[in-house]
Amino acid sequence: MITTDKQGDAKDFHDFMKWARGVQAIREEVIQDNGTGTEQAFHVPVLSKDEVQQCYRRIGRQMLENELLPHQQWDDQYELKFTKEGRMQLSNFQRSFIDSMLRRRLGDKKVAFHIWENGLPMLFDRSILQQRAATEHSVTLEMLQSTLDDALQWYAALAKGIVQYEAQPELQVRRELGAKESSKQQHIRRQALRAANQAWRQGKKLVEQRDSRKRTWDDMSPLEQETLERYDTGKTQQEREKHLVKDHTPFRSTI
């Protein structure tokens, strides 16, 4: 992901590091603005989910202001939007553009999220390494060994986070339903959900009619009675929830 492209050809590692350090710079801005840092300069704080989202919005704004091609600059879809309170809002189209840029430059947007959450390892972050050397007054073999250990832990946490994220069943279902080519499984799932929603709406309507005394149990047909009973006992809702696409857990990769 980091060293090769989709075809397996080697990437320009200097370009990767340029973008990785740019991502790190945004992290440092958020830390400074939020007061997340610590007294020890070489101690790396872990950012919260909200702080990581702040980083994402900042890099999104930078890209939309500085990384657009000439033809994109005149496209309203790339124009920044703000709420009445002055908070920037990113559209789904803009998020897709940002994710594509991060994927092209870093291999995957998860790499950026990993850097925002945990920071770059000292092996890649020269400023922290220099600060630590200045604090300890020399560069020792133990310092170099710990620097390599930190880098390995950083890579391992990234790999583990990606594996855990990709293994989520909910994520696989979402991708199947969002696929351009409709599969048989996708068709069956949508039909089942449509039928469950129809039964839920019908049950809700029958409850309203019964509670408002517009209709009694005896006024209903056997099929309507069964529909009402399944709704009252929660079976209709259970069937409906079984076919709904559940939210997946956002990517996190704490070291």
Image: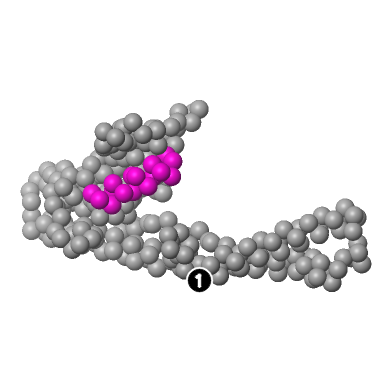
Kindly indicate the quadrant of the structure image that contains residue 56: top left
Nearer to us in this view, 184 or 37: 184
**Residue type marked 1:** Gln
Q: Position of residue 55 (x, y in %)?
A: 34, 42
Nearer to us in this view, 16 or 130: 16
Q: Position of residue 57 (x, y in %)?
A: 37, 40
Who's the residue at 76% across and 62% down the image?
203
67 to the left or right of 205: left
Q: In this picture, which residue range is highlighted in magenta?
A: 90-105
Give yes or no for residue 147 being in the magenta stretch.
no
161 to the left or right of 230: left
In this rendering, is residue 73 above or below 158? Answer: above
- What kind of secondary structure does the magenta stretch mostly adopt? helix
In this rendering, is residue 246 above or below 92? Answer: below
Give yes or no for residue 97 being in the magenta stretch.
yes
Who's the residue at 41% across and 43% down the image?
93
The local secondary structure at tag 1 comes to helix
Nearer to us in this view, 149 or 181: 181
Task: Tell me the residue that label 1 is attached to.
Answer: 185
Nearer to us in this view, 233 or 42: 233
**Does residue 78 appear in this view?**
yes
Who's the residue at 7% across and 48% down the image?
138
